[in-house]
Image (spheres, helix red, strand yellow):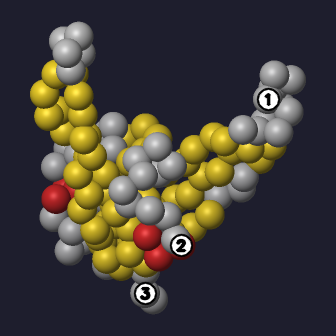
Amino acid sequence: MLGETVAVLTRRRTGEDEMGEPVYEWDSERVENVLVRPLSGSDLADSLRPDGIRVSYSLAFPKAWTAGKAPGFLTHRRVALVARGMDERDADAALRVSGSPDRTTPCPTAWDTTAEVGRVDG
């Protein structure tokens, strides 16, 4: 089984603007061999967003990716599915990590960390 290439985006504070508000940039780290499984998408039932849609995926990260093993590492991160055409430089279009990823130890497969990601459009 072979996975896809994704980019994990991390927000980094780069300074302050002229009003004293923080300015952020996104750093990208590519991760190879990530299993990507689409979860059921759905239309939003909110009457204020009749054309809205929710998309979500379950990602299984490989054991070889050691950066993601630190507790809470994927919290507040975003993920771009590079192999599916998402631009890793566009953090606004990237998928947001939902909740806390689950790490399985010991794990008999090559993938030991799963996370759900998604976004709402419309």
Q: Give left or right: position of 71 versus 61.
A: left
> How many neighbours does mark 2 have within 10 angstroms: few (below 14), some (14-19), or many (20 or more)?
few
Q: CA distance from mark 3 to mark 2?
A: 14 Å
Query: How far across and how far down the image is residue 83, in percent?
Result: 47, 76
Residue type at numbered disc 1: Arg
Seen at 40% across and 47% down, the residue is 91
Residue type at numbered disc 3: Leu
Question: Relative to 73, is 48 above or below?
Answer: above
**What residue did someone put label 2 on?**
84
Q: Quadrant of the N terminus?
A: bottom left
> How many neighbours does mark 3 have within 10 angstroms: few (below 14), some (14-19), or many (20 or more)?
few
**What residue did someone put label 1 on?**
49
Question: Relative to 46, is 28 above or below?
Answer: below
Seen at 36% across and 56% down, the residue is 89
Tell me whether the residue at label 1 lies in contact with that at label 3, contact meaning CB atoms closer than 8 angstroms: no
**In the rendered structure, which disc, 3 or 2, sits on the residue that comes first in sequence?**
3
* Outermost residue to the bottom: 1
**What residue did someone put label 3 on?**
2
Q: Quadrant of residue 62?
A: bottom left
Q: Quadrant of residue 119?
A: top right
Q: Which mark is residue 101?
A: none
The mark lying in front, picked from 1 and 3, is 1
- Viewer-side residue, 115 vs 24: 24
